[in-house]
Amino acid sequence: MNLRSSKQGGLSSPKGEQRGVYTIAAVAIISALTLIAARSITSTTVDSVRLTSNTHFAAEASLAAEAAVSQARVWLETPNDPSTVIWPASQAGTVVEFDVVNGGQTSTRSYATTFGFQVSGEYVRVFGKASNGAGSTAVVSEWVKEEKLTFDTSADVPLALDCIQGPVNGNPDIHADPDGVPPNNGITLSQSASCPKTTFDNLNGQNGEGVIADTHDAGDQWSRVFDIDRSDFYAAYAAGEYAGLGVYVYQAASMPNSNAAPDTFTMPSFPSGAEFQTKGPGSSIKAWGTPAEPAIVVVQGCPSLSGNYTFVGILYIESATNPTDTSWTCDLQGMGAFKVIGSIIVNGTSTAQNSNFEVISADAADVDPNNFPSLGYSGLPGTWIDLEVN
C-alpha cells in the first residue's frame, strides 16, 4: 500500500512543472504584447504631436502670409506703384509673431513677410509670403482692383467743352504735347461731335502751336471723366469720404480767394519746356493740387477765375441748376492769370473767350494719371489662392 501511494505521489510532479512553463510563456507573451502596444501608443502619440505641430506651423504661416497681403494693400494705398515690385521681386514687410504656450511657458514664433504684385490692366494680383526660417513657409495671393474717381484717360485732353461759340480773342495758350516743339502734335481741344466750330482764332496761337481738335459724344461729359455716378460722388463727398484726398466741390459764388488755395508747390521745369507765362520754374505757387498729388475740383456754376487761380489736376465746371444740361453757357473771360496743369472741362458751351488763360496738359507736365485721387483697392471675391503651405 505504501509503495502504490508513493508511485502515485511521484506521478504528480511533471504536471506541476508543465503548468509553470505555461505560466512563464503566457507572461512573456503578455509582456511582449504590452511592449508592442506601448510602443505603438508612443509612436502614435509622437506622430500625433508632430502632426499637430505641423498643422499649427502651417496655420501660422498662412495667417502671416495673409498679413503680408494686408501690408501690401496698405502699401498700395500710400500710394505706391505696384509695377515697381513685380513678383517674384518683393518688398519686405513687417515681422508677424505668434505667442505659444506650452507647459505653462510662453514662447514666441516669428515669421518674416514679403509681398509683390502682378499687374494686368486695372487689376492687380497681390502676393504675400511668410517664413519662420525653420522650413515653415506659406504664399497666398489675391486679385484686387483699384477704385478711382476718374479714368486714366480723363486728363488726356487739356481743354474739353460741349462747344466753343463766338470769337476767341486775347492770348489763351495750351501746351498739349510733351515734346514742346511747335507745331504740337498733341490733342489740344475736344468738343461735342455736334458742335459746328472748326476754327479757333487766337486759341493756342501764342507760341505758334496751333490747335488739334477732337470730338466726344454729345451730352453730359460726367461719365467720360468720372468712374463714379454723379449722385454717388456728391453723397460720398457730403459724408466726408473724400477728406484728405484732394477732392473739392465749390459753388461758383463760394470759390475762395486764390491765396486761400490749400496746396503749395514749387513750379517745376517741365520736360516740354512749357511754363506759365507769369510763373517760371522755381516759383512758389498756391494751388488746388500739385504735380505729385493732382486734385479734382468740381465747380457748380460758372466761376470768375480772374486773379492767380491755379489748378493742378482736373477742373470740372458744370451747371448749378441742372448739371446734366450742356446747353448752358460759361464764358471763359477775364482770366488773365488763370492757370491749369492738367485739364479743364466745361460741361456746357463757352462763348466770347477774351482771356489769357493757360493750360499745360498732364502729358506735357509729366503728371502721372496714377497720382490722381484713389479710393484704395478692393478685393475680388473668389480670387484668394493658397499657393504654398509647408
Image (tube, rainbow, N blue to C red):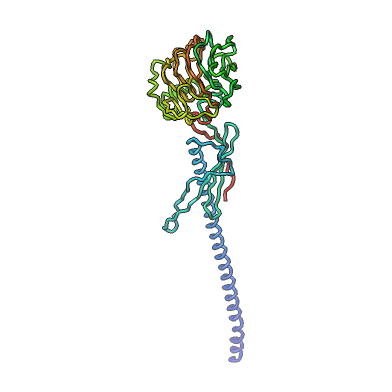
Percent position of residue 142, x then y: 56, 39
Count of marks overlaid on the render: 0
Percent position of residue 140, x then y: 56, 43
- Which of the 4 image quarters holds residue 11? bottom right
Q: Residue furthest top?
A: 166
At a point 59% along the width and 78% down the height, the residue shown is: 19
- Which of the 4 image quarters holds residue 189? top right
Observer-nearest residue: 351 or 354? Answer: 354
Percent position of residue 267, x then y: 46, 28
At a point 54% along the width and 13% down the height, the residue shown is: 202
Observer-nearest residue: 265 or 119? Answer: 265
State left or right for residue 42 relative to residue 242: right
At a point 57% along the width and 10% down the height, the residue shown is: 197
Q: Is 230 rendered above or below residue 91?
A: above
Quadrant (top left, top right, bottom left, bottom right) of the N terminus: bottom right
Q: Is 68 rendered above or below residue 349?
A: below
- Which of the 4 image quarters holds residue 27? bottom right
Observer-nearest residue: 169 or 300? Answer: 169
Q: Is 131 rendered above or below residue 207?
A: below
Percent position of residue 79, x then y: 49, 35
State left or right for residue 262 relative to residue 209: left
